Amino acid sequence: MNAAGRIAVLRRRYPGAVTFTFGDSRALCDDLLARVRLGAKTATCGALRDFTGGGEMLPERGRRDIALDWRGNPALVIETVEVRIRRFCDVTEEFALAEGEDETLAGWQSGHRAYFERNGGWTADMDLVCERFRLIEDLA
């Protein structure tokens, strides 16, 4: 079955599921999927601006979503357990570490600043959608 067929089956199993990819490159996507599988990544964030004006759907507590690999194949199903809007400068070390990408808040700030600069711009007071999730199904 091709990716579109697998996604259709998963959407029947998880009504309301949204598909998305982690990161902005194949290498980053692969790395983040691996971190979720290992339990090291239980949070993610995105710029609020990307969720307005017809962009992505905001995550919702209790909704199960389908994380795709860089080729568009279903990789994981996650369930959102918490969503908060907070400014970049107000992200806590605890949340930053839950993202599983860095070992310090300063490292998270540096990496995410670079990410947002590549993807629409960065300011210290930009609003972020901060999501915590749990792994429901590994589709590998």
Image (cartoon, rainbow, N blue to C red):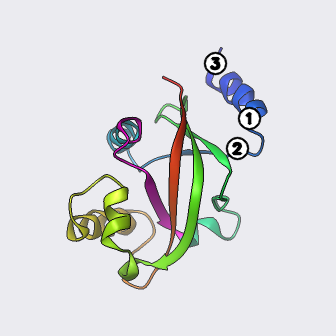
114 lies left or right of 15: left
- What whole-number distance in Å separates the C-alpha atoms at marks 3 and 2? 18 Å
Residue at 65% x, 14% y: name it: 1
Residue at 21% x, 71% y: name it: 106
The amino acid at mark 1 is Arg
Contact, mark 3 vs mark 1 (Cβ under 8 Å): no
Whichever of labels 1 and 2 marks the residue nearer the N terminus, that label is 1
- Residue placed furthest toward the bottom: 125
- Image quadrant of residue 113? bottom left
Residue at 58% x, 56% y: name it: 81
Residue 129 image offset from top left, x and y in percent: 53, 68
Q: Nearer the viewer, mark 3 or mark 2?
A: 2
- Image quadrant of residue 57? bottom right
Q: Is residue 45 visible?
A: yes
Q: Secondary structure at mark 3?
A: loop
Extent of the magenta region? 36-47
Contact, mark 1 vs mark 2 (Cβ under 8 Å): yes
- What whole-number distance in Å separates the C-alpha atoms at marks 3 and 1? 14 Å
Disc count in the image? Answer: 3
Q: Secondary structure at mark 1?
A: helix
Residue indicated by mark 2: 17
34 lies left or right of 49: left
Residue indicated by mark 3: 2
- Residue placed furthest toward the top: 1
Residue 133 image offset from top left, x and y in percent: 52, 52
Residue 11 image offset from top left, x and y in percent: 74, 35
Whichever of labels 3 and 2 marks the residue nearer the N terminus, that label is 3
Whichever of labels 3 and 1 marks the residue nearer the N terminus, that label is 3
110 in relation to 6, above or below: below
Residue 11 bears which disc, if any?
1
The amino acid at mark 3 is Asn
